[in-house]
Structures are given as structure tokens and as C-alpha cells.
Image (cartoon, rainbow, N blue to C red):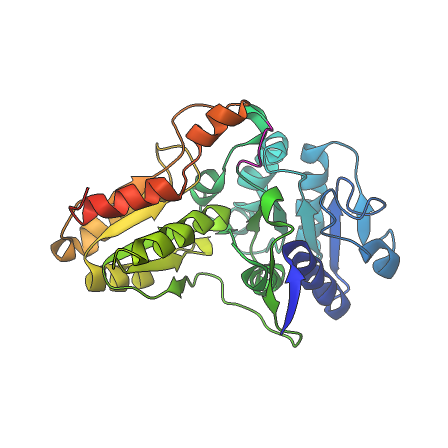
Amino acid sequence: MKTIQFREAIAQAMSEEMRRDDTIYLMGEEVAEYNGAYKASKGMLDEFGPDRVIDTPISELGFSGIGVGSAMNGNRPIIEYMTFNFSLVGIDQIINNAAKMRQMSGGQFNIPIVFRGPTGSAGQLGATHSQAFESWFANTPGLKVIVPSNPYDAKGLLKAAIRDDDPVIFMESEQMYGDKGEVPEEEYVLPIGKADIKREGSDVTIVSFGKIIKQAYKAAEELEKEDISCEIIDLRTIRPMDHETILESVKKTNRLVILEESWPFGNIATEITYQVQSKAFDYLDAPIEKINTADTPAPYSPVLLEEWLPNYKDVIKAVKKVLYKD
């Protein structure tokens, strides 16, 4: 094992796959000459050249469409958005072409393409640069959605995404690129659609994903001091979702808290809540609690932003509520 940063795990995954398959290329804003907006493609231009690490104009609709078209013609593009907030400019290509092309062509075209970049809040970036789009894309049949929370998962899942024959949305975070973690030096690939139990527990199940899961870890450490045992499940893949791992955990703990960095209405937590109440209702000893951002656009003020985002104190409060200890 070697300790590396999240950004290095992303670069390693892309580089290893590009060495393996010359139909793979990276395209996006500042991915080449600048080594990536967050240095997640550092050194790749030098190794692979400008034909395979391609800087684009500020035109997400244009280069998203080029990516979809080239995937239809036998390539395996990686399309990087500086932030998924900018993907809205190219969302027609993702939703109406990439996601639907296999069905609309009667199976004649696969679209092996990865759209990747940061999602969610990253500090004082304002309302138009702090949005979480996991539930938007997960609502679309034909798309797979991955949101890793650490370097190990990021590398293994990105390699799997690049090898997949269907379009994959791969979401990161500006605030995770500097995170460090142990990553094997040998080849490994993680399965898409399999959650991971990051912490075993017996009193309550906490489900989360992405960078916000750190708040669950912090809450679990604090609650342990009060002899409250939390089981933490990292979804890793949003679609297809690993319902079975969640259900088995709930059958053990009988309580569920879902932590998500998104608005409260129509999100991933809502889907999990439906699945659990429909398939494990008799195991629940308390109503399910879900924790989200405030139901407003993200504020710019750091004071308001701290109130807007979920934190470990919110998790502690929710856990105590389902345990009837509030």
C-alpha cells in the first residue's frame, strides 16, 4: 500500500487505463497544459500527448457532444467538467444522447463514456457553484452514478467506470482532492453497484456517500463515548444502488439515519427511505431520519454556509432521535 492524495488516485486510474487501451482519452477544460483545474491530470499531457489529453474551449455542450459521438464510433472518452455545475450547459448531451442511445439504436451503439468532475459545495462558491446533482443524474435510466469518498474507492471505481460499456457519471469534490489514503500499488478494480460497510455497529445504521460521510465518522466517534454503536455504510455507487447491504444492516440495527449533501426534496435519501420502509418495515424500531442541506440555494456567507450544510452535530441529534434519547 502507498499513501496518496485523492487527485493522484484519479490520475493513476486514468493513466493506467490509457496505457492499457489506446481508445481512451481525456478531454475538458484545462486538463492538459494546466495539468487539470485541480491537478487531477498532472503529467498526463507529457505522457500521452495532445491527441489523447485534450484542452477544450469553455463549451461544455460542444465537448460533451464530441465525447458522445466519439464513443459511438469506438472510443472510450473521459469528459472532465471543472464542476458539475457546468454540466448543466451540456446536460442535453448526457441525458438525451448518452443515456438513451443504446435503447434508441436498438442496441447498435454502446456509449462507453465517463463524465467526471466535482459535485456539491466547496466553500464560498455561491449558489450557482455549490449544487449536488447526484439525484438528477440518478433519475435517468441508462446512466450509472458513482460518488466515491476516499482515494482507494476513487481509483478502483474510476477504473471500473472507464471499462464500462455504458455512460457513467463520476462525481468528486474540490474539498477531497487533497485527502490522503492508502492505495494498492498493484492492479485492482472495484465493482460498480456495491456499497461498503466502513464501520461495523449494532445500534443504528448511517448511510452516506461522498465527502459528507466524514461528518458521519466524526459523529460515530463522539457517540461511541456514550456507548452508542453506529454502523456506517458508504454507498459509493448511487445507481445502481446496493439496497441489499442497506436492508441487511437495518435488519440488524433496526434504525436508520441517512446523511446526504443535497436539498431535502426528491433526493437519494428519499429513495432509500422508500426502499427500506417497503422491504424492511417490520424491522424498524423508529421512523427513518434523513439529514440534508437547508432547502435554499447555497449562501455565500461563511456563517450562513455553516448553517446550510449538514454536520456531525446534526448526525448525533438524528441518531439520538431514532434511539429515543433526544
Quarter of the C terminus within the rendering:
top left
- Quadrant of residue 75 within the rendered picture: bottom right
Residue 193: percent from the left, percent from the top?
44, 61
Q: What is the magenta segment's predominant secondary structure?
A: loop
- Please tell me whether residue 196 is drawn above or below residue 271 in the rendered image: below
User: Is residue 180 at all visible to an observer of this figure?
Assistant: yes
Quarter of the N terminus within the rendering:
bottom right
- Quadrant of residue 228 within the rendered picture: bottom left
Q: Is residue 162 left or right of residue 226?
A: right
Residue 95: percent from the left, percent from the top?
53, 39
Pick whichever, 257 or 146, lies toward us: 257
Q: Is residue 319 magenta?
A: no
- Residue at x-position 70% and y-position 63%: 12
User: Is residue 298 at all visible to an observer of this figure?
Assistant: no
- Residue at x-position 78% and y-position 54%: 42
As drawn, which residue projects farthest toward the bottom?
186
Residue 34: percent from the left, percent from the top?
82, 44
- Please tell me whether residue 156 is drawn above or below residue 134 in the rendered image: below
- Residue at x-position 55% and y-position 40%: 119
What range of the chain is rendered magenta? 121-125
- Residue at x-position 23% and y-position 46%: 320
- Please tell me whether residue 37 is drawn above or below residue 241 in the rendered image: above
Q: Is residue 222 left or right of residue 321?
A: right
Residue 135: percent from the left, percent from the top?
43, 40
Pick whichever, 156 or 252, lies toward us: 252
